[in-house]
Image (cartoon, coloured by chain):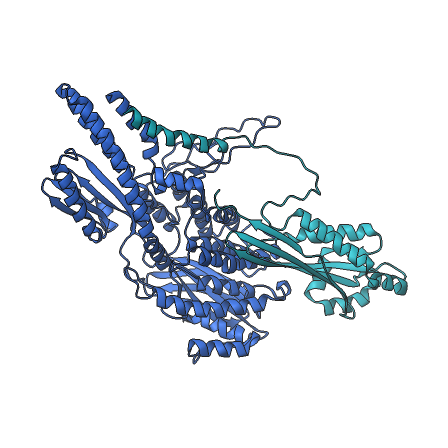
Amino acid sequence: MSKLLSIALVPAMALGVLALPGCGEKTVIRTQSDAAKDLSGRWNDVDTKNTVHEIVDKAMKAPWPERFTVEHKRNPVIAIGKFIARAEGEVINTSLITNALVEEFVNSGKIDVLSDPEETRKILEDQAAYAEKAKELGKEAAADFVLTGSIGVQNDQEGRQAVKFYIVDFSMTDIQSRKLVWKSSCTPIRKEVEQSKWK
Amino acid sequence: MISRSLLLCASSIPLLLVGCKNAVDVRQEMVYDVQTKAFEQAIPKVNGLYDCVLKGELPESGASKVAEMDDISDKNELIWQMERGSIDSMRFNSAGVKQHLDRASQLVGERRTASLTRAIGTYLANDTAQEYAGNGFEHVLVDYYRSLAALMSAQRLQGIMPATGDEPWDKDTAVQAMNNIARGMAIERIQFNKDNAPDLRYFDDPYARFIAACMVLATPPELRAGDDMGFAWTMLSTACKSYVKQSTVLGGAEGMRYEVPKIPTPVLQLTLTVGSMYDPVGLNTLVQDLGISTEGFKSPALGKDKGMVLVINHTDWITPTDRLEINFTAGIWAGPSVSEAERLRGVSVTPIYAGWSTAWAKGPGSTKATGWTVALAAFGEGARLFGQLAPGTWIGFEMPTHREDVPIAPPGMAVFGEEEQPLVVTSDFDAYARATLKDLQPGVLTKTLARTLTKHISAEVVAAGAREATKDKGAGEQIGGWLVGLGAHALASASEVADTRHWGLLPDHIETSLAVVTAGKLRVAVRQANGSTEMGDITVPAGRLVIVPVRTFPRPVACPYPGGPPVVPAPAAPAPAPAPAPAAAPAPAGK
């Protein structure tokens, strides 16, 4: 019987040891806001920040703002349009991207941003009608260009391994002429996620 | 020696007594409460069943005090979130659906992979000891309901449906959410199921693909991405192929009815509409490949004054998972009875008498287990005769099972203004549940038998030890030794509880009807044999699809309360919250 008891006790003790690592207090570590920490492989704050920075940087280096400034003797006014995101099972807060874009463009001092959301909505609903109205308003009160973008994701998954590939495209359209004045993409963001077999 | 043996038995109790025998009955009440819109009565039952509660709610039915903080059990969190999401979905509470099912979706991602704790728990106690991980079709449906909640928010925010209060998303994010969640459902979830459970008959979900396409057509054109229409077309054409394949795999299967024998008319209508706009050549090939007759189908291109309306009728209740008990008593003629509540569930008893012993099966369709009871009776009585089993020994185990399938109520009509169109069965969740359980049953049975055998061998070692220790003692101690043996076997049997957990608030099946209508205000309703369900007026935008979900019960579940539904007293008010201490530790997320 004592042997039997020992046999019964061994798995019970082993279970106890397995259960112990689960008992612990939650800890919070304060980090720098630009520190990259990927938990799930989903779009996160660092991706938003890097993307916005790259878009603004590329926009400044493109020829269209300078060309416009030389021609019109003032900064171009842009409206920040829609950023449409399509990512399987993932909802990306695109308003964070558009808000950050407004901030970075305004702070650049070289490109002005249409701040009235109602005006922006009108542009997005019907650019042709807005262009007509803009002529009446006078150039200073209206937007000259509209910036739109898209975020697409390519997922590749095999078993517990997944690779996510975020592609961000954006383009600037002249509201009056409806011409595309600039189109570019950000450096693709690639994330590898591997789930362990046992948890 | 007896005291040591007793200690061994006593120490086993916490490990063995896991699971609750009356969960099946409580679930029946929960379903009835939700059906009668007694949501506040159903919520404590869901909380009690799965040991989870939110602050300010009753932790179980009949509790006198509400919970002072959230208390969520890890083990059953997924199923609790699913059921709570369903309740909020029926209340058209998108914020509640988002809260519960977003978390459920996260848990699906975590739990569909193997878990060490789950595996150990299963082998030590019973299947109810493991974390609920859900089935493939349930994983898809978590995203289905999330996507539908985002769609409802988006439609309300666009003025298509009347506003009902605060929404959890702004319009653009709601539109993005309904599309992206549906994409995840139709691509990632289904592919994971295909990769990880290729032998199951639930290998694809054509309805999920159809809905993912519908989300694109319900998206305002200015919020559509460049590849949205391509995606919609791919989903629709894949859905058509999948419907054909599934009808051959599930149609005519033993013990179940598959109610979607061919590509449902609304799916075909939408496929023709999108295909003719997006890929006429591909559509032609698809029609030829599948041998579909397109005669009589309306697929008009949506003009400036036309829109489409899809009514989705979530009908009746999915079959509940019940339990089939198989028992043996040595040296006793047992005659288990069936209560009225059990009889209503289709429970029967099939006993086999062998010598002085009895083996019996009890549960829905107990005659199915006659082979098992005959074998158990013969083996057990033999063991008793040869002195290997003491008189009074009880050996038993349980298996999850389904009640007998019955034909669905004939689908009714969808009302679009002055016109009516038939509803068509577009997805059969009940068939998926039945097929999945049937496909998993051999594995569950093998594990149950191995565990039962191990437990009873251990119990018999204890019993033999107790008999040996008391054989030279007085009559009182010998009886004590015998009782220790019986107790050990009884504990082993009582601990073998079937895992009947399932998402019980899902509908039995989905019926849909698609109509091309004049843009503008439109009355929508569903007319069935037992009455009409009014969905009120909607505003259909030109060139777009509007989706109207409905929940109906043409075959409602019967009231499970013997004296009629109970009147529930109002819960006591929560105790005032203590003043927050500086740098207080966060409330624990689990037990």
The image quadrant that residue B128 belongs to is top left
Q: Nearer the viewer, residue B540 or B147?
A: B147
Task: List x then y, in percent, for residue B170.
Answer: 61, 53
Residue B340 % position (x, y): 21, 46
Q: How many marks?
A: 0
Q: Colour of chain A?
A: cyan
Residue B166 seen in the figure: no
Apparent side of residue A26 relative to residue A190 in the rendered image (left or right): left
- Answer with the quarter of the image where residue B469 lies: top left
Q: Position of residue B229 (x, y in %)?
A: 58, 68
Is residue B514 or residue B239 the one in the foreground?
B239
Q: Quadrant of the N terminus of chain B?
A: top left
Q: Residue furthest front?
A: A3
Residue at 28% from the left image edge and 61% from the top image edge: B254
Most extreme residue toward the top is: B474
Viewer-side residue, A104 vs B34: A104
Q: Colour of chain B?
A: blue
Q: Viewer-proximal residue, A184 or B338?
A: A184
Residue A14: image quadrant is top left
| Residue B122 in picture, x, y percent from top left | 37, 41
Q: Is residue A48 visible?
A: yes
Q: Answer left or right for A90 relative to A49.
A: left
- The residue positioned farthest toward the bottom in the image shown: B295
